[in-house]
Amino acid sequence: MEQGSSKIGQLMHGLGMDLLLVLKIVAILFAAWFVERLIHLALRRGYAKAKAQGREEMTRYRFFRNAVRTLMVILALIAIVYVIPSLRSLAFTLFAGAGILAVVIGFAAQKALSDIISGVFIVAFKPFRVGDLIQAGEVGVFGQVEDINLRHTTILTFENRRLVIPNSILSEDRIVNSSIRDERTCEFIEFDLALHADINLAMALMQHRALLHPSRIVSPDVATSMENPEEPITVRLVKIHEGAITLRMYVWAKDPVDARRMHYDLNQAVLEDFLEQGIPFALPIRRSLQGDSTRPVVPAHGQAAQ
């Protein structure tokens, strides 16, 4: 026991530390924690008062809370380095060669700085907020924004997995936001049928099934809508290609999640109706190209095939 205490004492002496210095470090850590708690409580109280304003206040609250926590950790580390003589002398030695060190640190921190600036821009210009349903990129994962901090944004997917994306990537990518102004969603439900299918019967079956679904809502008056205002459910023939026709049904739901569930339900219901009524689906056309190496060899007259 005495040997262990002696080793600890030697280590502290080697670092230039004594009991007073340890107390200073403890005081710095406590002060950082206490200030962080005070600011956190102030931010939470301010958010509670402005909660009626919705997701924008939640986004600012989450971002500033994470920023304050990170800032207090950095300040505490700087203060600890300053009060320990050996670490302070090492820091002064490193900063003496500030030219090369600045280049190295600047290069290493370039990506982190880009993420921080992008996070500030996201909070300022609000392309999405905490709680919004978004899709990042052409084939990105669709999910709900759970958190935004200095470095990255966390998206909770429908598989209950958290996708962590750096802020700099999100700021440069295309964002599909389903919640920024109006959560009502027009779902496109498409079926590829054969050219000889009874189009009118197929459209009637699709409309009937959509009208019965409990998640369907009345189509709103939207300037970009391609629907027929005289019909409760619009079905259009949108494509004719390679021996097939594509029917598209426009169905509205109150939010993207209900729209996705409704899409899957209608896929099954309409499929069952089509099979029952004998409406044929399109079959893919396969073309085979023959070259000299694949073309069958025709034997010459009078010669047997090899």
Image (tube, helix red, strand yellow):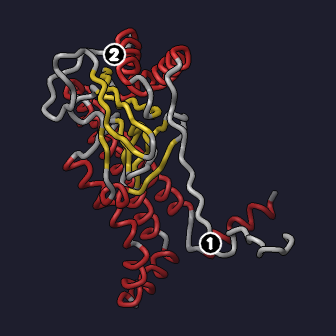
Is residue 266 something one can see in this rendering?
yes
Tell me which amino acid carries mark 1.
Answer: Gly
Question: Residue at left 51%, top 61%?
Answer: 20
The residue that disc 1 covers is: 291
Task: Decide which of 306, 282 is in the foreground and name it.
Answer: 306
The quadrant of the image that shows the C terminus is bottom right
Placement of 151 over or under 127, stated as above or below: below
N-terminal of the two: label 2 or label 1? 2
Foreground mark, 2 or 1? 1
Secondary element at tag 1 = loop
The quadrant of the image that shows the N terminus is bottom right
Residue 136: x, y in percent?
Answer: 38, 49
Residue 63: x, y in percent?
Answer: 32, 46
- Residue 216 circle label: 2
Labels in figure, total: 2
Q: Residues within 10 Å of mark 2 (few under 14, many from 20)?
A: some
Question: Residue at left 19%, top 28%?
Answer: 53
Q: Hey, which quadrant is residue 46 in on the image?
A: top left
Answer whether labels 2 and 1 touch (C-beta < 8 Å).
no
